[in-house]
Image (spheres, grey):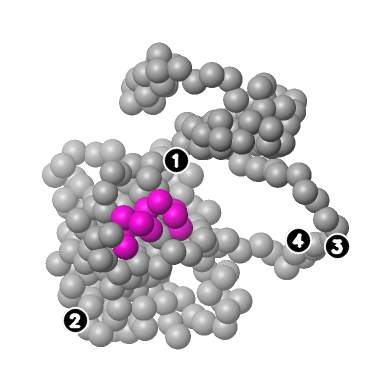
Amino acid sequence: MKFFLSFLQSNHKHPIPAYDFWEHYIKNGIQEAGYQWMEYPAADWALGLVPKSKEDHLKWKQNIWEKTIEWLKTHPADIFLSYLYPEQIDTLAIKEIQRMGIPCVNFFCDHVRLFKKIPAEFEVFNLNWVPEFKAAKWYKKAGKPYINLPMPMWVEPQYRILKDEANQHITFIGSKDIQRKLLFENVLQQYPSLSLAIYGNGWKENNTPHQQQLMPDYTLGKKLIFNFNFIR
């Protein structure tokens, strides 16, 4: 099986949040599974997320989709697998790829963070790869095609060393953001006696698994200040 990949690949470094790790994970995972991947080598998919004028964005979209379709005509694939935001998607181009006999699957992991419902652009895909449990309910309710699977992750074999041990302590490792903070606050409100350790950038420097230190009250005023600074 051969996958055509549109996973924010780029030959340039762009001033947008981390995006290039997906390419490493998905390519190595496909290869280890015994399949093949290919890509349009000159494509700059990440450029579609860089802020620009409406005219420049339309030029980027028209250019990349035209070249992608031409590439697929001479380099046929079994599956078109992408990680695309709604503003990057050309539904007519996706339909053209589908008419070529290539099913299209889109992975997206920020539904809950960015949207209140399924973006209309996602409905064109044959299948939506949805890692978020809450967002999966949106697709089920709307009757849209989806599969609820974890985010793609690939670890080098030398690091796949597991110790035979039992540990009942609940631990989260990852950087701090508002969505995770509110999630943990909600959990601790429901289970105040829960022992939870949190490690990663942005949390307390000592990473102490003490819920009162990790989860201070998050008032409405603080929420407004955070969102104002985020938008600014």
Q: Position of residue 172 (x, y in %)?
A: 65, 43
Magenta part, dominant SS: helix
The residue positioned 44% from the left and 40% from the top of the image is 17
Q: Earlier in the sequence, mark 1 or mark 3?
A: 1
User: Circles 1 and 3: CB distance less than 8 Å?
Assistant: no
Q: Earlier in the sequence, mark 4 or mark 2?
A: 2
**Mark 3 sits on what residue?**
164
**Mark 2 sits on what residue?**
99
**Mark 1 sits on what residue?**
17
Q: Earlier in the sequence, mark 2 or mark 3?
A: 2
Badge 3 amino acid: Asp
| Residue 134 located within the stretch drawn in magenta | yes
Which residues fall within the magenta stretch?
Answer: 131-140
Badge 4 amino acid: Tyr
Q: CA distance from mark 4 to mark 1?
A: 26 Å
Check residue 159 in the rendering and tell me which mark sits there, or answer none.
4
Tag 3 secondary structure = loop
Quadrant placement of the N terminus: bottom left
The residue positioned 80% from the left and 63% from the top of the image is 161
Nearest to viewer (mark 1 / mark 3): 3
| Residue 2 located within the stretch drawn in magenta | no
Question: How dense is the environment of label 4, judged by Cα within 10 Å: few (below 14), some, or many (20 and up)?
Answer: few
User: Circles 2 and 3: CB distance less than 8 Å?
Assistant: no
Q: Position of residue 101 (x, y in %)?
A: 25, 85
Badge 2 amino acid: Arg
The residue positioned 53% from the left and 54% from the top of the image is 21
Residue 11 lies, with reference to residue 189, above or below; the image says below
**Residue nearest the observer in this picture, 88 or 130:** 130
Q: Earlier in the sequence, mark 4 or mark 1?
A: 1
- Furthest residue to the right? 164
